[in-house]
Each structure stands twice: as structure tokens, then as C-alpha cells.
Amino acid sequence: MGDLELDSFRSETRAWLEANCPESQRQPISPEEQYWGGRRGKFPSEDARLWFQRMRERGWIAPEWPAAYGGGGLSALQGRIIKEEMKRIRARAPIYGIGLWMLGPAILEYGTEAQKQQHIPAIINGETRWAQGYSEPGAGSDLASLQCRAEAQGDHFLVNGSKIWTTSADKCDWIFCLVRTDPVAPKHEGISFLLIDMDDPGVTTRPIELISGESEFCQTFFDNVMVPRENLVGGLNKGWAVAKALLVHERKLMAELGTDTPRQMVEPRAAARDYLAFEAGRIADARLRSDLVDYEMLMHAVGLTHARCFEESQAGAWSAAPLVMKYVGTEAEKVKSELLLAIMGSRGLGWEGEGFSQAEIDTLRLWAMSKAMTIAGGTSEIQLNVIAKRVLELPQ
Amino acid sequence: MSGAVLVLNEEERLLRDTAREFLQSHAPVAALRRLRDTRDELGYAPDLWRSMVELGWASITLPEQYGGLDFGFRGLGVVLEECGRTLAASPLFATGVVGASAILLGGSEQQRTTLLPEIARGGLTLALALEETHHHRPHHIATTAEARSDGFTLNGRKTFVLDGHSADRLIVVARSDGDVDSQSGLTLFLVHPMTDGVVRERTIMADSRNAANIRFDNVTVGADSVLGAVNGGHEILAPVLDRGRVAIAAEMMGLALEAFERTVAYLKERRQFDAPIGSFQALQHRAALMQSELELARSVVLAALSAVDQTPQQLPLLASLAKARLNELVKLVTNEAVQMHGGIGVTDELEIGFFLKRARVAMQVFGDTGFHKDRYATLCGY
């Protein structure tokens, strides 16, 4: 597609969005206003329903997925133009979910025709909400040592074990899991990728309360669950390749969504104005002033590096920058949270109740949540291992 | 900003490849070692400088009307980064960046048309005589410029004057009005170093490069030696210093990359406990952390270089960001480079020590980390 055609695609896109995106769907979104789909999913408003339906009919829930399964059948460049134009008018995402972000691309790459027909339109139509079943109580950073067992028995697998950190699994319909199908093979080679309907008998889920007080994460148990053989993705004992492809999507997502949180985010510079004494236009506490400028310089550098990653992807240039961003971005979040607590002093210690403002309480909760950021999606230590191996090519 | 800002374009990549090839064959670290060991009086090789001039580097940022290449600061940055990789000693920074910028931004049309083409031809080297204390304090100027009927009399002392002992002309920052720490009342003078009363003393520093202490005892200069307006020195100095900061940050980027790459190569080659030491996680994580810092630095340096030509209103903030972050980067990387090389890392035979020492000098040029953190915070209003 030439520049001229792309230009006209952009102006058509702009005109269509202007005409079809309801005004209420062009505002910053709160967690209650997000639509995640699924059997139990409800549209938070009539406008949200309208916006979702219009985008679905247009094929723009997943613009780059094949039209045969309900996608837009568009090129990556066209997909980017739609994203840019949505961003321009601050249009909300019509639907959220890891089916759309992570599983869909994997099924399109590794799935059978029947799997594509069963699951891709259901993701696009918001009919199924997906959970991810990777980690286990005994398999965290060493994910490949996972023990959740799937025994082949004729036309089905018998699944026994449990998965942990299954995000919002108590609200999900299906779960994609890494399971052990060959207990004697070397650990990476005995793993399969299995799709499991969470309504099946023997599947139970319970939420886990975190130090932040949130319980978004769950543990999901499988007790003699019978899963049809056709739910295997990527072939028997070939699950690790599928998982690796998905992990790339997850880390990219975590680096991008690092600050996308339901709670009210206070910026350290603004907090300094509200909570610190100034002398002659400067923060009087030299240590906090120094810490604040360190943090702001770090974030300035991180922001410029995100911009560089984007420019490089546009120009088709390779660099190591995207591989360091999960580590850098999540560590920076922790620096920020510690800095905010230091700036707020005892006012930053409020857990709940009337004695503190909502922003103060949110700051403390986010501080606790920030500790999970450098653990989930591959710990910082694992990220450094990846950089050492893939960028520096150090011997293993 | 439109178009790619943080990725090199085709022309810049070609320039980088040319610069790398040229410097690695004509100015490797061994050349700096030779200058040091022979106690070379000039402190750089005139042949090398002549070749750099022929490549157009002396005037790489100057407009074509003054004989320049008009390649912008991004082009300059590409060259300086390669200079940082080989620690090439030359007048490029003091003359081609700082001196040329001062004349371009502050000079009268007559000064520009006579001096800038001279720089481009390699016929004129410059040195900025600014610092008076052992920390960068650009407004702390006690050197006085007293007006006479036909000019000025200069009195004072300058230190850490890069290329000060060898430059053909000094750009002297002196106080023509106001108190010692005031940013107003400064005037720049172009002074011939052979003028009566100018006493230059070369200093030998850690990096084996050039700097001098200079004394001005009743030095009389004509009114035509003023660069820019009388009492208007700050307005010229501020953007010149920012350009210098960004340029040296680009050099430090190259220095850090080279020291780091040599270290990573050593981690793969050196064996202890029957394994390459690079297989040990304690070292892998430290190396990976440096890689992350290098990636951030790369974006900062490119943004700062682009700002000089494209968004000068952002330059003060980006220059301080670049200098502060690169100061800390080269400190980290050179310290780790020595430590990870182990015993051989502290020998003079290994070139890593040259990177360590150059880093410490570069860190002090036009502001240490504390200076730039304070400036960044002040610019941000806290």
C-alpha cells in the first residue's frame, strides 16, 4: 500500500471514528468503566455497548486479524493508523482482555482451523474472557519445572494440579494452561499448551489477597478435569514454543501498561509541592530534592527510550532497547512509590478510613502493588538473565 | 518534532562508519599512550588534526557560508562518539564545538567571516578560559575587565582551560560589571595568548589530555577583541556551554560503549573454575544492568543532540539530563570494567585504565552530576 493510499485510509479512519465514537467514550477510563467481555461480562453503559458493537461491525476489535474470523484483515501499518487515530481523539479501547492481547495471536499462529473458528470470533465478540495458567506454587521463575499433569486418555486429557497468579480467573470463562504431558522427557520437552473451559467439572478458583489488599490474582485448581484432545494447541509436548511466543506479548504489555492502574496516581513532583517545605523556590530537604531529581531524570530517560523503541520499530531498525524496558520500567515504578512515601511522610501510611485522603491511601496501596511489578511477568532477576543471554550473548 | 529523532538516518550511519574506520586506524588508544609516554608538548598529533579537518570535522556544525559542513549536532555527535571509543586526542571539542559555537553565536559578522572559515581550514584553534574554581561555576567570575579609552585591561586566573596551553586564541570570560556570582556583567574576549601579561601553565591530568592554568596580569586588549556585547557574555555562554555539554556527553557515550564491549568480550574469554567467568550470574546481572543504563543513555544523548538544531527551547533541560546521566554512566561502566578485568584491570598495560581516567576528567567538564541535578531541578521549578 503506497503513501497515498495510507493517507486516504487515515482520513477515512478519522472521519469514521469522529462519526461513530460516542463522546462519552473519549474520556479517560476508570476501572469500573472497562468492558472485559465474557459470559458474565456486562457493559458498563449503553454508550460502551454501542461503541463496542460499532467497532466490531467495522472489524476493528482486532484490525490485523483475518477477516474470516471477524478481524479487520488489515496490514500492520493500517492497524497502527487506527491506533494513532483512536489515540488522537482519546477513544477508549472497546474491550479489554488477554484473549485479545495474548491468546488470540498465539491461536492464529499455532492453532488448528477448528480452534481458530471456535475461539477467535468468540474473543472478538466478547463472548469469552480468558485467564492465563502458567505459574504454579512450585514453578515460578523456573516455569518449565511445572507439574500440573495432563494425562492422555483416549479422546481426552485428565488434568490434575493447580495454577497460581491466574489474573481475575474468578471472572473468566476459559483458561489457557501449560501442562505436563510427558513426565520423563527433559523439562522443556514434556509440556503442552491446553485450552480448558472453566465450567468443566473439577475446576475451582479462589482469590488470593495480596499485601496491597487487592485480590485480583487467583489460584485455580484442577481435580480430574476431562479436557477434549482437540483443545491442544501447537502439538503434544510442543507447548513451550507457544508459551515463549506469548511471554513476549506479556512483557511488552507490562512495559506499556506499567502505569495503567485503577488507582489514582500521584506524581512525585506534584506531591512535593503539597507535602514538602520550600525555601527560596527549592525543596528545603536536600535529600528529597536530590531523590526527586534522580527519579525525574530516570523517567525522562525512560520516556525517551520508549519513543526510541517506537521510532526504531517504524524504521525497521533492531536494538536491544525493547528487551531492557520491562526491567527498567518496573524498577522505576518501585523507585517512584518509595519516593512518594518518603515525600508524604506519615500521611503516606494511611491504609483506609477517614484520616487520610483517597489519593494518600491509593499511594500506599500502589506502593504495595509496585512490589509485584518486578515479580510478575518474569522477575527482574529473570529479565537480567534474558538480557545477559540474548543481548550480551554471555555463556550459560 | 516530526520524523525520526531517536534513530540515525542513512547519512549519519555512513558518517559513523567513516569516522569509526578512520579513528580506529589513525587514532587508536595506543596513539594516546604514545602522546603520554613521549610527554608530547602539543598533546595531540598535528597530522591527525589535519586529517580531521580534511574530513570536515572541524566545521561539521558550521553553516556552509562559513566553510562548514552544516551537518548539525547529530552529525557531530556521531563523530564524537567514535572519538570517545578510541579516546582520540584532538582540538575537536575545544575548537570545533566550544570555540566555533561561541563565535557563531556571539561573534559580529566580521568576526564570523574571518574566524569561522579559519577554523574550517584548520588554521585556528581555540580554548575557552572560563573556570576559576575546582568546580564548574559559570557565573563565578572574578577575573576583571576594566574599560580603558581604547579597550580593556584583564586581570585574573583561570583553571581547567581545555587546550589552553596550545590554542591559537583564548576566549576569556571576564567580569566587566556586577558581583562575583552574578550572571549579568560578563563579557567574552578573544585574546592572543602571546599578549603581554598572559602566563600559561600546562597541567598534566589523569587523562593525558590538555588543560592549562592561565594567569592574566594587566593584559590590555582592544575594543575589537570583545565577542558579542559588553556585559552580554551570559547570553552567549549559556547556549555554548549547553552545546559543549551535549557534545561531551556524546563522547562519553562512545567511551562507555567501548569500555563495556571490551569488558563483555573479556567475560566470554577469561576462564576460572573451569568456566568462562561470563557464565557466572553475579557478573551477568551487573553486565545486564549496564546494558540497560546504556540503552537509556543512548536515547538521552540522541534527544539532546537533536534538540540543539531542532528544539533549542528544550536544550537546557536535555543538556543537563544528558550530562548528569552520562557522568554517572561512565563512572559505573569504567569502575565495573576495571573490576571485571580483575588483576590485569589495574595494570597500565591494559587500555581500560585510559578509559577510567578519561571518564573522570570528562565528568568534571562543564558540570559534574551535582551541578546538573541542581540545574535540572531548578529548571523544573523545585
Image (spheres, rainbow, N blue to C red):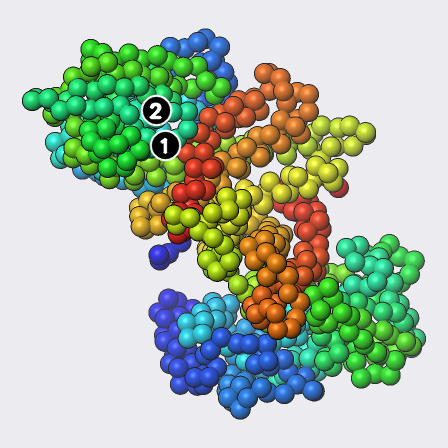
Residue B12 is situated, as x and y percent measured from the top left of the image, at 39, 42
Residue B26 is situated, as x and y percent measured from the top left of the image, at 43, 22
Seen from this angle, which residue lies furthest bottom? A46
Residue A24 is situated, as x and y percent measured from the top left of the image, at 46, 84
Q: Which residue is mark 1?
A: B137
Quarter of the figure with the C terminus of chain A:
top right
> Do dots 1 and 2 share one subunit?
yes
Residues at badges 1 and 2 in contact (C-beta under 8 Å)? yes
Crowding near the residue tagged with mark 1, few <14, some 14–19, many ≥20 C-alpha atoms within 10 Å? some
Residue drawn at x 84%, y 62% as measured from the top left: A137
Q: Is residue A372 left or right of residue A338?
A: right
Label of residue B132 in the image: 2
Q: Amino acid at mark 1?
A: Arg
Q: Is residue B306 left or right of residue A313?
A: left
Q: Looking at this view, is A261 or B311 the one in front?
A: A261
Label count reads 2
Quarter of the figure with the N terminus of chain A:
bottom left
**Chain letter of disc 1 in the image:** B
Crowding near the residue tagged with mark 2, few <14, some 14–19, many ≥20 C-alpha atoms within 10 Å? many
